[in-house]
Amino acid sequence: MTVDPNAATQGFPGPGRARPGPHPARYLVPALVAAAVALALGVYGKVHDPAGTAFNLAGFSSTGAVKSWLATAAMFFALVQLVSAAMLYGRLPGPAWSGRLHRWSGRAAFLIAVPVAVHCLYALGYQTYETRVMWHSLLGCFFFGAFSAKMLLLRSERLPGWLLPVVGGLVFAVLTIIWLTSALWFFRTFGVTT
Ligand code: HEM
């Protein structure tokens, strides 16, 4: 039997050769970056004086309405992420462009969520005056940490197959709770208005 000398470097174990597990740094670096990002946002949100700045867009009645609709759009793209990921993992039938759909829906969800979160952090700050608001602030910071970890893990090879779906699922679950504790609350309190 011939053994491909490059087999191990291509990510496939050579016959009869023990496959070394991933170096701990492959987990440790994303985990440390996630913690640092979440902590930095939380500390900034907590120590600065909330600016209270409001902004508006033509056609919208308030800052909260603009943010709630943007958060809902981010949630929509996050759902596309979930469905396209299931296609990529063969859990749902999908087109050949499932990969592109997954990448672009992810970029869209992130780009829409950033200005909303920037307003939250800068104008409202890290608040804990209600259980709902406490979870929203905490998970808002955690989201950007977990998102950074997922981006780093994407670039890492030879990780266990379950890791990416678990971290991706966590990012999705966290965004869902952020949406439930903000946009859904806003629509239920003030009505579904623009
Ligand atoms: C993915 C990230 C985030 C999204 C999509 C998001 C979305 C929203 C939305 C739609 C609202 C309701 C509109 C408003 O009252 O202005 C809101 C409120 C709020 N957000 Fe965020 N947010 C995010 C991250 C954060 C972060 C990181 C913090 C602080 C550390 C934060 C703190 C707050 C606070 C204090 C409120 C007011 C809550 C209330 O009194 O009802 N948010 N957020």
Image: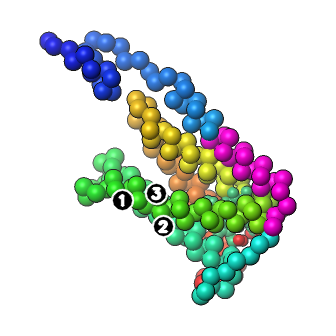
Which residue does the image show at 51% across and 44% down from the upper left? Answer: 150
Q: Can you give x and y, in whole percent of width and height, for residue 31 in the image?
A: 60, 36
Give the vertical position of 31 relative to 10 (above or below): below
Quadrant of residue 159 within the rendered picture: top left
Question: What residue would you read off at disc 1?
Answer: 101
Marks 2 and 1: which is nearer the front? Answer: 1
Which residue does the image show at 50% across and 45% down from the upper left? Answer: 151
- Tell me whether circle 2 and circle 1 mark residues in contact (CB < 8 Å): no
- Tell me whether circle 1 and circle 3 mark residues in contact (CB < 8 Å): no
Q: Can you give x and y, in whole percent of width and height, for residue 60 in the image?
A: 62, 84
Which residue does the image show at 59% across and 88% down from the upper left? Answer: 59
Pointer 3 local density, CA inside 10 Å: few below 14, some 14–19, many at least 20: some
Whether the residue under disc 2 has CB within 8 Å of ligand 1 = no
Q: Can you give x and y, in whole percent of width and height, for residue 93 in the image?
A: 27, 56
Q: Amino acid at mark 2?
A: Phe
The answer to which of 79 and 101 lies nearer the viewer is: 101
Where does the magenta region start and end? 34-51
Give the vertical position of 163 relative to 170 (above or below): above
Q: Is residue 157 left or right of residue 40?
A: left
Whether the residue under disc 1 has CB within 8 Å of ligand 1 = no
Q: What secondary structure is found at the residue carrying circle 1?
A: helix
- Look at the image and say whether residue 41 sits in the magenta stretch: yes
Pointer 1 local density, CA inside 10 Å: few below 14, some 14–19, many at least 20: some
Q: What secondary structure is found at the residue carrying circle 2?
A: helix
Question: What residue would you read off at disc 2?
Answer: 76
